[in-house]
Image: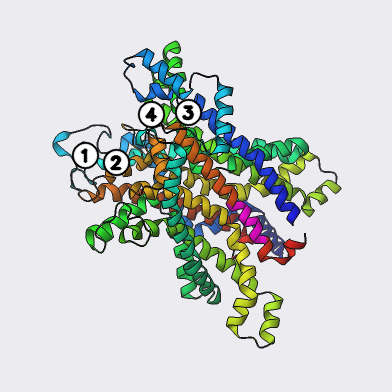
Amino acid sequence: MAQSSIGLQTGLALGRMEQRSLWRDAMRRLVRNRMALFGLTVAIILVITAVFGPMLTPYDFTATDLTITSQPPSFQHWLGTDPVGRDFLSRIMMGARTALLVAILTTFFSNTIGIVLGGLAAFRGGWVDISVMRLAEVFMAFPSLLLAAFVNASMKRPTAQIFGNLSQTTGMKWVADTTVIDMLVVFGALSIAAWPWAARLIRGQILSLREELYVTAAQAVGTTDWGILRRHLIPNALGPMIVRITIGFGGAMLAESSLSFLGIGVQPPAASWGKMINDALTGWRSYPHLVIVPGMVLAIVVFAFNMLGDGLNDALNPRSRGR
Amino acid sequence: MFKVLIRRLVLSIPVLLMVITITFTLGYFGPGDPLLFQYGEQPPPDMQALERARHAYGLDRPFHEQFFSYVAGLFTGNLGRSLVVQQKRPVTEMMQKGLQVSAQLGLAALVLMVIVGIPLGIIAAYNQNSWLDYLIVSSSALLPTIPQFVMAPILLIIFVLNLGWIKTSFGWDGTVFSQKAILPLFILVIGPLLTVVRQTRIGMVETLTQDYIRTARAKGLSETRILVRHALKPSMVAVSTSLGFIAAGLLTGALFVESIFAIPGFGSLIYNGLRSSDYPLILGTTMVSVIILMVTNFIVDLSYAWLDPRVRTE
């Protein structure tokens, strides 16, 4: 009786131990990290605001009212109004949608290109490796934001032309919408500037993981290449990738705002934090809140994604902690 | 080592050629006819005058002819004339003027990094895990995440509007030693400076655990002598690794800071070029930025050889 009870307990304990997988462990470490939790909270609020956008905003974010221009915060307009009388809180909230959309597309495309080309370079080696990495080097020779700004500025007209023709032939009005074209050009430009860094990271990851002893061990017991890729390479490369993607995500939101600040990104009536800051800069003495609010929102969001990335790094790569 | 450097120099030539090709092609096919663009949405009043202007600028020649004459111009320092800004002045001349201003800012930034950044990093490393270390490390994590175009208006509001410590804050007095340059310089330097602090700290912490430092201590050398003679040089390897990022940060930083504070430097030229689709200007500034980054990376490689004797023998 006693013996079986001990057996049962050991069994239960073992069962519990099996449940403590890599991801569960990582989750536990992440939730314990206060700064990471802050980052996660901001990210969740941002996503909710962006997804439900117009349902949550108190006013229509494009509705102008020239009787209430540049008002300070009040009960009717919590963050005041802008110089053409649009509700500022609504515009800040819709700015989240712009930033998030561009960041999601940029992250997805730059990393897809990076994974495909970086993976090809690492697995094929030889001239494939050389030509991919040379090409990446050419793109990395530019200061990233300047490259994005340059591509953005020069591709805007051709893209608008192509989509204008497309909308005429297909009859779909939305493809020629200026906001759609603006966003498309911005995320395209950012992806072009970002993919080499992703490709180089992936290639490095694969090359270094392939030399690990456990891969040799797996090969020795006759695991197939696909099995090694699935069981060893992908799970081990995933951690650093997730960290890079999270930090890059905040960076992409910042880059979108930067391009819009420079006046070549997303244009009104669409809302972009960078453009809002630039617009308010001429009146910074009279209406400081119009500069401070979008600026602080942008800074907090970028900081939050950095903290989330750091937290994920500690959670997913526990060996790197304390460095 | 010498061979490696030569090899890198030779390999950078095709990269530069590719960069020129990409920028020129984008500039050629991208914005459409640069002359037509100046008329905006309205149709040009006189088609013949337009044709004459196209011929005068050489824009009616085929792509490859324009490309080769541009590349040939690069060797003689002729980068074409601005289409919009400042009465169609030569791009080279505009960039010379701009770089004279930006170089002062950049040099001042570098000096601050060395005389403020490195000592702060050393202090943090010597007081590892003290409150001072935490303060330095956490501020070096927080401050660089604030974008320059957010920090600038916030500092303006605090120091000019509320405190009134700085009276005039826009424009350029011809020198970096002026009240007007305080805020721009601070905003430009804070991010790179904190990178230097962080990297110095990392390098220093690692160096201080080395055997030869313990030997030096056992010999009875004073702590300053250990720092200056033995610890400082090897810890700088970590700093020089990030020099490329710092240079890129200063370049993009100049773009925002100079345009916000109305400083007529290189960054303002990039900004004006982008805003008015002034292609010769955008091409020129992009090319010079790429060359600045390449030179920086070359200096990084040289500095490895100077800092770490093991690299020299390779």
Query: Marks 3/4: CA distance?
Result: 15 Å
**Do the residues indicated by labels 4 and 1 lie within the same chain of the protein?**
yes
Chain where mark 4 sits: A
Indicate the quadrant containing the N terminus of chain A: top left, top right, bottom left or bottom right.
bottom right
**In the structure shown, which secondary structural element does the residue marked by tag 2 occupy?**
helix
Query: x and y percent of residue B297 in the render?
Result: 61, 52
Quarter of the figure with residue A11? bottom right
Q: Do the CB atoms of the residues marked 1 and 2 lie less than 8 Å apart? A: yes
- Which one is earlier in the sequence, the residue at label 4 or at label 1? 1
Q: Do the CB atoms of the residues marked 3 and 4 lie less than 8 Å apart? A: no
- Which one is earlier in the sequence, the residue at label 1 or at label 2? 1
- Which one is earlier in the sequence, the residue at label 2 or at label 4? 4
Query: Marks 2/3: CA distance?
Result: 24 Å
Residue closer to the observer: A281 or B182: B182
Query: x and y percent of residue B5 in the render?
Result: 70, 52
Query: x and y percent of residue A282 in the render?
Result: 26, 44
Q: Which residue is mark 2?
A: A279
* Residue closest to the far left: A67
Residue at x-position 41% and y-position 49%:
A301
Residue A179 bears which disc, if any?
4
Q: Residues within 10 Å of mark 4 (few under 14, many from 20)?
A: some
Was residue B26 drawn as part of the magenta stretch in this picture? no
Residue bounds of the magenta highlight: B296-304
Q: Is residue B176 above or below residue B6?
A: below
- Which one is earlier in the sequence, the residue at label 2 or at label 3? 3
Task: Tell me, yes or no, if residue A11 can be seen here.
Answer: yes
Indicate which label's residue lies in the foreground, 1 or 3. 3
Residue closer to the observer: B93 or A320: B93
